[in-house]
Image: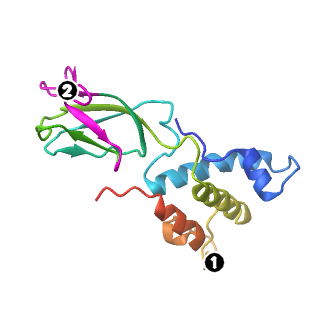
Amino acid sequence: MGLDLITRTEYKTYAGISSTNSDAVLDVLIPKVSDLVKTICRRSFVDYVTEYKTEYFEGGTASYMPEEWPVISVYGLEVSEDYGSTYTELTEFTDYALNRANGSIRSINRDFPILINGYKLTYNAGYETIPADLKLAVLDLTSYYLKNDSAVHATGSAQPNTMQVEYITTTNLPANIKRVLDLHTASYA
């Protein structure tokens, strides 16, 4: 999977670039920035809009919150009483329903019983059109990496004969980008 959150054309329009001099760099950088944003936010945004995502859960609760959101549609929810060897389709609106208010899958009339590998959910989720604030953050982050030679630079200099590596965390990001990514970060609490 791994669809990009922006295109080269979108970035060049945003940055006012008309030449093709930076195309090769952008073709490498845009997928990496898209993957970084997806990792920071713990969701893919676009990868499962047209492709199905399948998740397994064990029950023990009245609802299940899928990893990806917003949920567009549920293709199917199946139950297995033989530890995932075989599955039987549950009926939407009889056994379960999609709670459109929060994107959860709710059991109707009872909790989902605890079953090892007991439930298989297949669904579509994400955005057909990326929210404008998220798109702007991805465009800004792409600019940030272009201006910083595709790296987050350390404040101190490396000593001779040593290599210095700084791993990016969300606290290293410019505040305007971090604020937007925080708004779109999945919380599993």
- In this view of the protein, which residue sits in the foreground, 116 or 183? 183
Give left or right: position of 17 versus 67.
right
Residue at which label 1 appears: 157
Residue shown at the point (23%, 34%) measured from the top left:
96
Instruction: Mark yes or no: residue 180 visible.
Output: yes
Residue 101 is inside the magenta segment: yes
- In this view of the protein, which residue sits in the foreground, 69 or 35? 69
Q: Which residues are magenta?
A: 77-102
- N-terminal of the pair, mark 2 or mark 1, is 2
Q: Amino acid at mark 2?
A: Gly
Residue shown at the point (78%, 58%) measured from the top left:
15
Of the two numbered discs 2 and 1 in the rendering, the one whose residue sits closer to the viewer: 2
Q: Kindly state the secondary structure of the residue where label 1 is placed.
A: loop
From this view, report whether residue 47 is shown above or below residue 151. Answer: above
Residues at marks 2 and 1, CA–CA distance in whole angstroms: 54 Å
Is the Cβ of the residue at disc 2 closer than 8 Å to that at disc 1? no
